Image: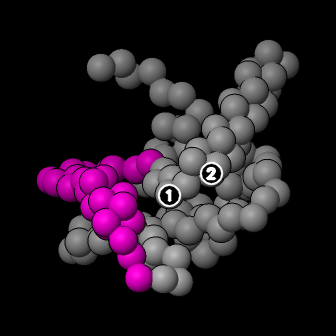
């Protein structure tokens, strides 16, 4: 494993070390991300932060099915991606519940990385 950190790992390190930055991100995720990375693309989505706490089991529920009785495909889609992240310390990442949001996150991270590279060159 490399000791070299990227922009995103550095952000997680900051959030573990700096309680004020962590609180700002939890209280207002968009503002917290803009503060560190400089921008967050507009769009029809929300960003929510769920902080890991040492005495808490965090449950992430799949989205409820549309306003109809779920069929077998709905139940299969909601139950085939169940992950347990056990005995971890300092786990972090993004949960992306929709394919379209995958691209939103990819665009966000690409923009942030490009800005960081430009700053390094100056």
In this rendering, position of residue 41 left or right of residue 86: right
**Residue 67 to residue 1: above or below:** below
Do we see residue 20 in this rendering? no
Look at 79% across and 16% down and name the residue there. Answer: 121
Quadrant placement of the C terminus:
top right
Q: Is residue 85 magenta?
A: yes
In this rendering, position of residue 70 left or right of residue 101: left
Residue topped by disc 2: 101
Please name whichever residue, 79 or 103, is drawn nearer the observer in this view of the structure: 79
**Crowd tier of the residue under label 1, counting other residues whose Cα lies within 10 Å: few below 14, some 14–19, many 20 or above:** few
**Disc 1 from disc 2: Cα separation:** 7 Å
Where is residue 43 shown, x and y percent of the image?
Answer: 78, 59
Q: Main secondary structure of the magenta part?
A: loop
- Cβ atoms under marks 1 and 2 closer than 8 Å: yes
Residue topped by disc 1: 97
Look at 57% across and 48% down and name the residue there. Answer: 99
Look at 30% across and 59% down and name the residue there. Answer: 76
Where is residue 83 shown, x and y percent of the image?
Answer: 25, 53
Please name whichever residue, 95 or 20, is drawn nearer the observer in this view of the structure: 95
Do we see residue 32 in this rendering? yes
Q: Specify the farthest residue to the left.
A: 87
Q: Secondary structure at mark 1?
A: loop
The residue stretch that appears in magenta: 69-93
In this rendering, position of residue 115 left or right of residue 73: right
In this rendering, position of residue 117 left or right of residue 98: right
Quadrant placement of the N terminus:
top left
Q: Secondary structure at mark 2?
A: helix
**Residue 92 to residue 7: above or below:** below
Look at 81% across and 22% down and name the residue there. Answer: 118
Where is residue 102 shown, x and y percent of the image?
Answer: 59, 45
Q: Which mark is residue 34?
A: none
């Amino acid at each position: 494993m490399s000791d070299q950190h990227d922009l995103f790992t550095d952000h997680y390190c900051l959030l573990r070390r700096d309680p004020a930055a962590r609180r700002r991100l939890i209280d207002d995720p968009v503002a917290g991300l803009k503060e560190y990375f400089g921008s967050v693309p507009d769009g029809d989505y929300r960003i929510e932060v769920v902080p890991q706490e040492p005495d808490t089991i965090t449950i992430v529920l799949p989205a409820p099915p549309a306003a109809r009785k779920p069929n077998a495909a709905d139940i299969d889609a909601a139950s085939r991606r169940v992950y347990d992240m056990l005995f971890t310390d300092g786990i972090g990442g993004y949960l992306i519940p929709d394919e379209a949001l995958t691209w939103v996150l990819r665009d966000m991270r690409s923009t942030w990385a490009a800005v960081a590279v430009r700053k390094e060159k100056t």
